[in-house]
Image (spheres, rainbow, N blue to C red):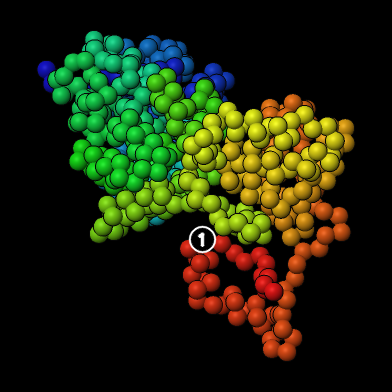
Amino acid sequence: MSYTVLARKYRSQNFDDIVGQDPIAQTLKNAIQSDRVAHAYLFSGTRGIGKTTMARVLAKALNCLNADAPTIEPCCKCESCLAVNAGEDIDVIEIDGASNNGVEEVRKLRENAIYRPARARFKIYVIDEVHMLSNSAFNALLKILEEPPEHVKFIFATTEPNKVIATIQSRCQRFDFNNISPANIAKQLKFVLKKEKIKFQEDLLLPLAKMANGSMRDALSLLDRLISIGTVPLTPQLLEQFLGCTNSEKIYNLIEKIGDSDAAQTLAVVEELINTGQSEPQIVDSLVDCMRDLMVTKSAGRDTELLILTDEQRKRLGQLTEKFDIAALIYNITTLEKLRWTIKNSDAPRALLEASLLRFALSQHFLNVDTLLAQMQSGQSAPLKKNKIVNNTPAVSPNTTKTEEKTDVQSEAAQFGDMQAIKDNWKSILKVISSKFGNGTSALLNSAAPARLENNILTLSFPASARPAMQMCESTGRAEQIQTILNENYETNVKVQFEVEVGSQPKTEILDANTKTASQKKNQIVNDPAVRKVLLGLEATIIDIEQNK
């Protein structure tokens, strides 16, 4: 007896068996129970998610011979149900729209539709890939689709509903099928493996489910390939070796090297991935997925339901998040997404991939223009802050221990109780903030000064020219960081807020009236080739121009 592939062997037989399409199944069941079944349906969605299966289940429900009327629980044993399952029922006609897309085929359909079914209640036409019909064929369908005989039902399935003309869609009830979640696919795969009595490791299921990209049929086909290898038990390593699945631990290792700013090891891991058969686009796709998981973990915690990961993977991501901040992850994801399309059309995809990853590992933290302006206004150059969160500890002389340093810093400002004490020790406070959160935070605060302390609320004042720095502090949680430092190191309990210094005015351009107007000088600066090159490289815009005295 010939072998039946898993995708056919475990095809759903009733509404309750269909995985991941519960709302649609429930709607159709309610329509049958209330005797409100439409004469035409349009099922749309990507491949392998249950459109044709749903059409067959609906056909069995309408024509089951062991029921006196349409039923939501077809018997799957009568002649009609068995013939529908095999695609051979004389009253349920399945038509491939790709190979029967001409107007002549549709005219024959219309001629045959007027005859009543041979043994069932309805004559049901299931047209798969209906978007492949020609415009003439669509137009030939319009009349019978609008006023069909009472014994005729139409079920159309398509992966591209945008190609189905509007006049056809308006005559159908449309259902959009969702991609099946990896969790549901993994659950079904586990059921199939147990039914087949095949040993497997639990860690196999989620990576295999993700490879299917939301398609149950693809997942079962991949599982068939895996079983054909003949190795028991089935393990995640087989996915990498035989199905080309990227090893998640190697991707985590690559991201770890990027976070550690280790250029040599970053290139070494890329080499290892390519040697195991991974293409450059596959590596980029895996990095995007992992960076996304890191971003979600950083934002919502590693126990969030937004992540479909094993416990071991959640733990690993929790460790990696310490090496990155949200800004770096967002930049990396958007850059990799652009890189994906570039390397697919490049003759040197590996060089592009390696250059981009080295940029992540070695470049400065990708600060926005507001932060860069704040640093320039404070007289500091942009710090070499990597795309991880760096705890920059101040240099300690050989004769000074860390404990002594902390004691010296705290002794200067411990237990301050009035505004004057805060002002006197503001530089020491900034020093502690820098040691805890890095130079970026202290650079933003260099232009600020303590203004007042009222009701345990410390107000820090920024000049109007440093308004971008204040806005950056407000939007990135700097106030909470300062509160933490003050409360932990100086035995106080204050809250921090920011304001623009009253009466402060931003600097304006200082121009020589005898030479050029302000507008002319601004245009000359903006159009300078070197300035334009810098703006293009940073993806920045000019918000202010000042002339140094």
- The residue carrying mark 1 is 538
In the rendered view, would you say 32 is above or below 40? above
Point 52% across, 71% down: residue:
532
Label 1 residue SS: helix
Q: Is residue 395 left or right of residue 463?
A: left
Residue sitting farthest toward the bottom? 514
203 w.r.t. 180: above or below: above
Which one is in front, 19 or 41? 19
Tell me where residue 309 appears, x and y as whole percent.
42, 25
Tell which of 246 and 170 is nearer to you: 246
**In the depicted view, which residue is nearer to us: 108 or 535?**
535
- Counting from the top left corner in percent of width and height, residue 365 is at 51, 49
Quarter of the image where the C terminus is located: bottom right
> Residue sitting at 64 percent across and 59 percent down?
379
Q: Quadrant of residue 195?
A: top left
Percent across and percent down for residue 387 are 48, 44
Q: Is residue 78 left or right of residue 544?
A: left
Which quarter of the figure is the N terminus placed in? top left
371 to 180, vertically: above or below: below
Q: Is residue 453 visible?
A: yes
Q: Position of residue 461 (x, y in %)?
A: 79, 49
The residue depicted at 32 percent of the width and 12 percent of the height is 77
Residue pictured at 54% horizontal, 45% vertical: 327
Examine the image and state in which quarter residue 380 appears.
Answer: bottom right
Mark 1: which amino acid? Leu
Residue 486 at least partly seen: no
Q: Extreme left residue here?
A: 1
